[in-house]
């Protein structure tokens, strides 16, 4: 039987997850390469795997920020399979997500929540709230501001016209 090239990765779950060449016999120590994932899944899987008492060590890294993949290292006690532990962790993550979604939907259907209306954050709404605060503090009104702005602009235009030697008609 021909030996596999130790420099090639072995697919575990199609093309999404691969075993890198550093695995041990019996797959008790494995580094998985998970494609198209980042710290979100890496940290979740690390956490879920470490909850398994048969896991001796688990850590992950993102080899480079521009590469969309993570490396997940799993080492098991008593020669148990890291592949089986990863399967179990993925199933546990799916069960947890399903339980959270079910509880959310139950709460939503029961109306067991408080609806909070967020303030609008567009320019006009924020500007109107700020002017209302200024008026409450006695610092002037928006109409007074516009009138003052118009007067300044007229004065600046008159000054500029005077410098150019032209008169402004009113």
Image (cartoon, grey):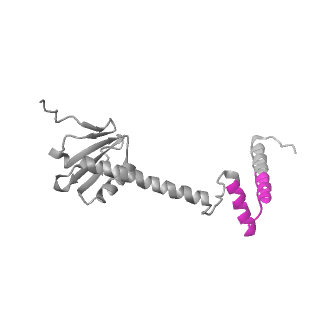
* Range covered by the magenta-colored residues: 125-152
Q: Between 108 and 73, which is closer to the camera in this rendering?
A: 108
Q: Furthest-top residue in view?
A: 2
Residue found 81% across the figure and 40% down from its top: 166
Q: Is residue 24 visible?
A: no
Counting from the top left corner in percent of width and height, residue 118 is at 64, 58
Residue 146: say if magenta.
yes
Residue found 41% across the figure and 53% down from its top: 95
Against 103, residue 40 (above or below) is: above
Against 129, residue 164 (above or below) is: above
Counting from the top left corner in percent of width and height, residue 159 is at 76, 48
Residue found 13% across the figure and 29% down from its top: 2
Q: Between 165 and 72, which is closer to the camera in this rendering?
A: 72
In the image: residue 50, left or right of residue 40: left
What secondary structure is the magenta-colored segment mainly?
Answer: helix
Quadrant containing the N terminus in the rendered view = top left
Counting from the top left corner in percent of width and height, residue 33 is at 29, 42
Residue found 42% across the figure and 55% down from its top: 96
Counting from the top left corner in percent of width and height, residue 32 is at 27, 44
User: Which corner quadrant of the image does residue 66 belong to?
Assistant: top left
Q: Furthest-left residue in view?
A: 1
């Amino acid at each position: 039987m021909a030996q596999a090239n130790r420099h090639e990765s072995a697919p575990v779950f199609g093309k999404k997850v691969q075993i890198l060449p550093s695995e041990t016999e019996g797959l008790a120590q494995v580094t998985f390469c998970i494609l198209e994932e980042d710290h979100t899944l890496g940290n979740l899987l690390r956490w879920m795997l470490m909850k398994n008492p048969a896991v001796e060590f688990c850590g992950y890294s993102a080899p480079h920020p521009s590469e969309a993949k993570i490396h997940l290292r799993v080492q098991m006690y008593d020669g148990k399979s890291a592949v089986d532990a990863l399967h179990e962790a993925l199933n546990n993550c799916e069960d947890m997500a399903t339980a959270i979604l079910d509880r959310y939907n139950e709460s939503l259907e029961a109306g067991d929540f408080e609806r909070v209306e967020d303030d609008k954050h567009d320019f006009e709404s924020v500007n109107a709230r700020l002017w209302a605060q200024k008026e409450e503090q006695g610092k002037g009104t928006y109409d007074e501001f516009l009138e003052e702005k118009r007067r300044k602009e007229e004065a600046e235009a008159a000054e500029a016209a005077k410098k150019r030697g032209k008169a402004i008609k009113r």
